[in-house]
Image: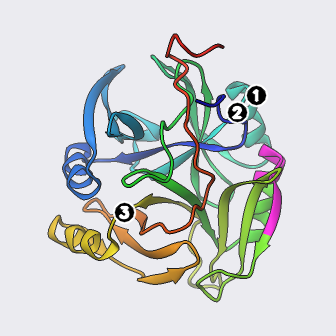
Amino acid sequence: MTEAFQAGEAVWVELCTIDPQQAEEFYTALLGWTVRHEQLGATTYRMCSVDGHDVAGISDAAGLHGGRPRGWIAYFAVDDVTRSAEQAVTLGGELVTQPRYLPAAGTGAVVIDPFGAAFGLYQGESRAGVQTLNTVGALCWNELDTGEPQRSVAYYQDLFGYTTQQRDDSPTAHPYTVLMLADVPVAGVLELDNEWPNIIPSKWITYFNVGSLDEALTRVSDLGGMPTVGPVDSPHGRLHLVKDPGGHTLCLVQLEGGLRPSRAVCDLSDPAVDR
């Protein structure tokens, strides 16, 4: 067991989609998830787990996050979600979901950064975040794909206090920046082409570990999704961008070396945990 995530770490991922039932069927078949339904106000939240460990959520866009399908949202730990939400807006972001208490979890909010990427803020209480990292079917990395890398990095540095590390081992020809908390890598920033008329909004990409990339890509197609970019050989394993049947982008990686440090994440609702 470990202490809760430190402020600034990516602690949760959630798919916001117009068809959560379709998403549930796709991801359970693709990643081996077990899904339980939890009531959240007037909507249903789907909590997804692997071997009893919660790894992600699926939300209904009709009831959350401004009524729009935001796709995969990465949530970052904060000590004071109200204060961090205010700061995110002051720095140029747009608050689309006000801080909201989530029973048996904590308080979350969702922001659009100045360049179009949706991300979340999460103040954990009874639940710190994901309960496993890097295992098959679980979160292993978060990456911001953006045409405004310098300005995007500055925004998240101001918000979360990151330092940066430049990586020369990126499998693409594009510059790659790693956001760091001390010596802990938190997320990557990939520079995209951003010349008019091909300007595209920034987007956070969620990476999930798979046991076999080739088998996973076959399942993606069979289940109504679509492989898009890849396969790409990286220092951490072969990876491939795909779209699920709702059109939401994610990355599958056959992980060989950890992108984030593995850890046994504590569940703060466990009475054995000394808080």
Separation (CA) of disc 2 from disc 3: 29 Å
- Compute the Cα span from label 2 to label 1: 9 Å
The amino acid at mark 3 is Val
Does 44 appear above or below 274? Answer: below
- Residue 273 image offset from top left, x and y in percent: 58, 16
Q: Amino acid at mark 2?
A: Val
Which comes before the other along the chain, label 2 or label 3? 2
- Give me the residue at 39% from left, 50% from top: 69
Q: Residues within 10 Å of mark 2 (few under 14, many from 20)?
A: many
* Location of residue 226 (image quadrant): bottom left
Q: Nearer the viewer, residue 230 or 21?
A: 230
- Tell me if 226 is positioned left or right of 194 in this view: left
**Residue 131 rendering spot, x and y as whole percentages:** 48, 36
Confirm or deny contact between disc 2 and disc 1 (CB under 8 A).
yes
Percent x, y of residue 143: 59, 62
Q: Residue at x 20, y 54 (%)?
A: 29
| Mark 3, residue position | 210
The N terminus - image quarter: top right
> Can residue 98 be seen in the rendering of this structure?
no
Q: Is residue 187 above or below residue 196?
A: above
Cα separation, mark 1 vs mark 3, equals 37 Å
Q: In which image quadrant can residue 175 be found?
A: bottom right
- Describe the element under mark 3 as helix, strand or loop: loop
Residue drawn where x is 55% and y is 79% of the image: 234
- The reply to whether the C-beta atoms of the residues labelled 1 and 3 are less than 8 Å apart is no
Mark 1 highlights which residue? 83
The dot on residue 78 is: 2
Q: Is residue 161 magenta?
A: yes
Tell me the quarter of the image containing the C terminus: top right
Label 1: how many Cα within 10 Å (few below 14, some 14–19, many 20+): few
